[in-house]
Image (cartoon, helix red, strand yellow):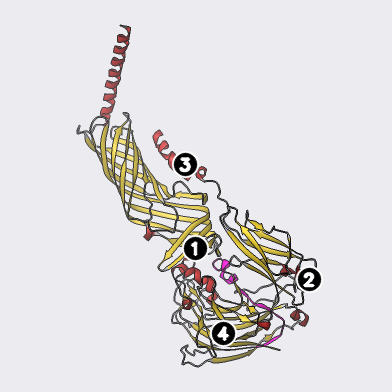
Amino acid sequence: MKKNVFLLIPFCACLATSCIKDEPLNSECDIEVCKVHHDAADTIFYVVSDTLQNVNSTDSVIIYSIRPDVRREDLSQVRVTLATTPGATVTPANGSVQDFSKGDVTYTVVSEDKQWSRIYKVRFIPMTVLNPNFDFETVELEQPKERFYNWFAYGRGNVRQDLWATGNSGFALSRSSAKPHEYPSVMLEKGVSGKGVKLETCSTGAFGAMVNMRIAAGNLFLGSFDTQNALKDAMKATRFGVPVNQKPLRFTGYYKFQPGEKFQDRYGMEVLGRVDAPDAYAVLYKNTDENGQPVTLYGDDVLTHENIVAIARVPEFKVTGVADTCAWEHFDLPLEYRQNLDIARLRNFGYNLAVVFTSSIDGATFCGAVGSTLLVDESTIIYE
Amino acid sequence: MKKIKYLLLLVLSLTVWNAQAEDLYEKWNTPRGTSWGFLLRTGYVLGGTSPMPLPAEIRSIGRFNPEGGWAISADFYNMFNKRCGIMTGVHYFMEGMNTGATVKNYKMGIQMGEDYLEGMFTGTDETKTFMSGFTVPVMATFRVSPRWNINIGPYVSFLMYRDFEGSVYDGYLRVGDPTGEKVEISKENPATYNFADDMRRVLWGVELGADWKITRRFTAFANLDWGMNSVFKSDFKTIDFPMYPLYATFGIAYLY
């Protein structure tokens, strides 16, 4: 049998760890965390914890929202420390003092293997006040790939605000062949007035089944969508809310709704007798905890978190049909306050407002009916 | 004269040695006394399907379970002389493995109908594969000693059952290239895959075998089937490197 052992040798050798080659150098070149240091950070920022930002993998502009009364020359001495992918090098040097008084500072990050690079801009802009008239007229295709629609708005002084988010970028992973109008959140040509929004629960196809996320509800919300966590923890991917400094009183708007035919659970099994329903709500919450650390509400606590101060939620949706000929249904709801509003906190943008529309109420857990469609337009938040 | 004497001695001793060897080689003979015969084999298959050599993207192999099965085969041989001959046969085999590896910046692209997702994965990959079918080798066979016989030659395999499935988790995908969107994949919600339909039905390679005579009728054998084409079709792009089957069978053969 001695020879049998010899025959095993080449075979074992390939499986043994001795065959593992040297580790290749890293190819990634991300800024993962950005922190700015300023001697008078409390006069620059509303909250000192705003100086530290975790940077999404898709972001190439790192934006710091500062107090509007900050003079540009106050930004001439800002030290920036960055956490990059291990091994990556960055110019200008990490930890160096930069001059932001003349505008953005550009950073170039080169990967450890020198094969890849990314360019980032660090930008200081005055905090913008949310435009509370959600007419959904300003919409564009995502850049640069133009895969799906993104909504934005203009605030005071015609400053562009990118405060609306959707789960479209998550859907893009599963359905690369989908056209912009085949995504869950799409532009509607005929709204109440001008354009509107169409949210439709869509199948995510074979890729969705691979990760047990068989549907994607159409959604549109104030906040941001974190694709990085979309598969790992979908509830954490929807980061709800943007800072506001005025007291919201009412949440209004128009909708049309038609449920999809077959309600399915997360495993794709039909739930007999259950009819899908959409959801729409406005939530006001304190955006820091007792220690001054930032608080963001996610898919799993946006309606239950202890920091919530007020909620307005459409109690029941009528099935109106979604054809052009069907009539729009109006809603006008007061925000119901559970806690008193701290005016000083409000003036310092210490509250976040989340406005959320979705075509399937349990879409966050991937339950719903493919085809459920919610049309929305001319929604507003009426401030005090 | 002395030289001649030595030469004679050498020739004589060789002849004697040869005569002894001839006797021992007789033990390979069939009861029929023919130059041809059969070897009926049964054995257990161990091995794996793997890129060769391992690419640098594979950082460690945490777990490897050969999940083979039985092989049953019938070989026919015909000796041209005492030492050399030809052998062919039909082998039924079950080959498989289950492995877990960590990878870094591993290029993958998955086609699902019209949809395509491509990127670089860093994390853990678990793979389970199983194949069963028939192998037909055509080999040269050599009796290298009274106890040892080795075979070598090409083979063709026809797969009846194919499976290649697994999951990726504990890591992230960079969509497109290393600067693309980062998508994390957790162990709690892994991404599962099944590429069985992308596997070839016909494989070929080189078989290397050795028989060791235990008794006049039985041998212990080892066969190594070394695949020379990837188990996946050439248009399959999900795994960036060819995956070769490399399986060995260990067992007992009956000679008659």
Residue appearing at x 47%, y 90% in the figure: A324
Category of crowding for the residue at label 1, using alpha-carbon neighbours closer than 10 angstroms: few (below 14), some (14–19), many (at least 20): many
C-alpha distance separating marks 1 and 4: 38 Å
- Residue behind mark 2: A42
| Residue lying at 30% horizontally and 36% vertically, measured from the top left | B218
Instruction: State the residue at coordinates (46%, 75%).
Output: A179
Kindly report the distance in space between the C-alpha atoms of the residues bearing marks 1 and 2.
44 Å
Q: Quick one: SS at disc 4?
A: loop
- Residues rendered magenta in the picture: A227-252
Q: Is mark 3 in CB contact (under 8 Å) with mark 1?
A: no
Q: Kindly identify which residue carries mark 4.
A: A137
Numbered disc 4: what chain? A
Amino acid type, label 4: Glu
Amino acid at dot 3: Ala
According to the image, label 3 marks what residue?
A13
Q: Which of B204 and B241 is in front in this view?
A: B241
For the residues labelled 3 and 1, the Cα–Cα distance comes to 30 Å
Please state which of the two labelled residues, at mark 4 or mark 2, is closer to the viewer.
Answer: 4
**Local secondary structure at mark 1:** strand
